Image (spheres, rainbow, N blue to C red):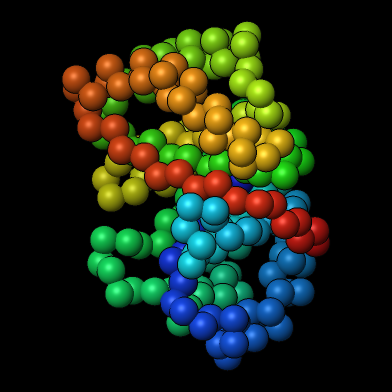
């Protein structure tokens, strides 16, 4: 049974460091970290969006993940996070999903820099065809990896977002400088996936963050 990697991104209001909700979340931290089935946790501030936060939890199973989502503790933490979220721009909304990655996320998170990306596809997308195209890109990537690339993982998310299926990737890098330098080379190969735009609209969300580990 694969582990489930849950990640969430929140745009934050200014001054959240001194907010009572932040203090309450920190106090709730030990309970959050002792939830049944929680393997590990990470957090960081996305480098592209400084006034925001990224959280990643790894659960031992889908059942453990779903149990956490249904708990009163999750609801309490969600209410506190809601007090911190910047809602001034209706187009910028929090993002949350859960993925059974093909490789353990902890191996990706061993890198100093982690990039999390999501590709949103219509519900009727040909998943096999998309996966085949993506696998072709991976074959090229791993045969000639860009400088600074550590490891990647990918998978289909458990949850649809606004009526779209989500294909998520995680990649580890030695530094943000090497990640940025490799961007052009990677983008050129990933452009092959854009052939799906002849049939579907491919949108993406991507954040890169420095990894901070919180171990239960």
- In the figure, residue 128 lies in which quadrant? top left
Q: Quadrant of residue 67?
A: bottom right
Q: Nearer the viewer, residue 60 or 192?
A: 192
Q: Is residue 100 visible?
A: no
Instruction: Left or right? Give the position of 74 relative to 174.
Output: left
Q: Position of residue 154 (x, y in %)?
A: 55, 31
Q: Is residue 133 visible?
A: yes
Determine whether 196 is above or below 42 in the image: above
Q: Position of residue 150 (x, y in %)?
A: 70, 29
Q: Residue at x 26, y 61 (%)?
A: 91
- Quadrant of the image for the C terminus? bottom right
Q: Is 150 located above or below residue 28 in the figure?
A: above
Picture coordinates of residue 182, whole percent (x, y): 55, 27
Instruction: Look at the image and tell me in which quarter the N terminus lies.
Output: top right
Q: Residue at x 44, y 77 (%)?
A: 13
Q: Residue at x 66, y 52 (%)?
A: 210
Left or right: 90, with 82 as reference point: left
- Horizontal relation, residue 16 to residue 89: left or right: right
């Amino acid at each position: 049974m694969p582990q489930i990697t849950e990640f969430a991104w929140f745009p934050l209001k200014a001054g959240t460091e001194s907010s009572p909700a932040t203090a309450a979340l920190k106090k709730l931290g030990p309970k959050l970290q002792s939830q049944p089935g929680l393997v590990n946790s990470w957090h960081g501030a996305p480098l592209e969006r400084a006034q925001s936060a990224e959280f990643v939890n790894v659960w031992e199973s889908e059942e453990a993940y779903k149990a956490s989502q249904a708990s009163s503790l999750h609801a309490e933490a969600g209410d506190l996070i809601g007090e911190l979220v910047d809602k001034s721009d209706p187009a910028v909304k929090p993002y949350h999903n859960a993925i059974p990655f093909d490789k353990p996320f902890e191996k990706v998170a061993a890198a100093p820099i982690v990039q999390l990306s999501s590709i949103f596809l219509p519900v009727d997308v040909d998943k096999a065809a998309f996966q085949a195209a993506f696998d072709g890109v991976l074959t090229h990537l791993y045969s000639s990896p860009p400088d600074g690339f550590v490891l990647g993982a990918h998978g289909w998310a458990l949850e649809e977002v606004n009526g779209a299926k989500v294909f998520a990737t995680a990649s580890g890098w030695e530094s943000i400088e090497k990640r940025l330098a490799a961007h052009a080379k990677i983008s050129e190969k990933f452009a092959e996936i854009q052939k799906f735009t002849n049939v579907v609209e491919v949108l993406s969300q991507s954040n890169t963050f420095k990894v901070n580990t919180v171990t239960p």
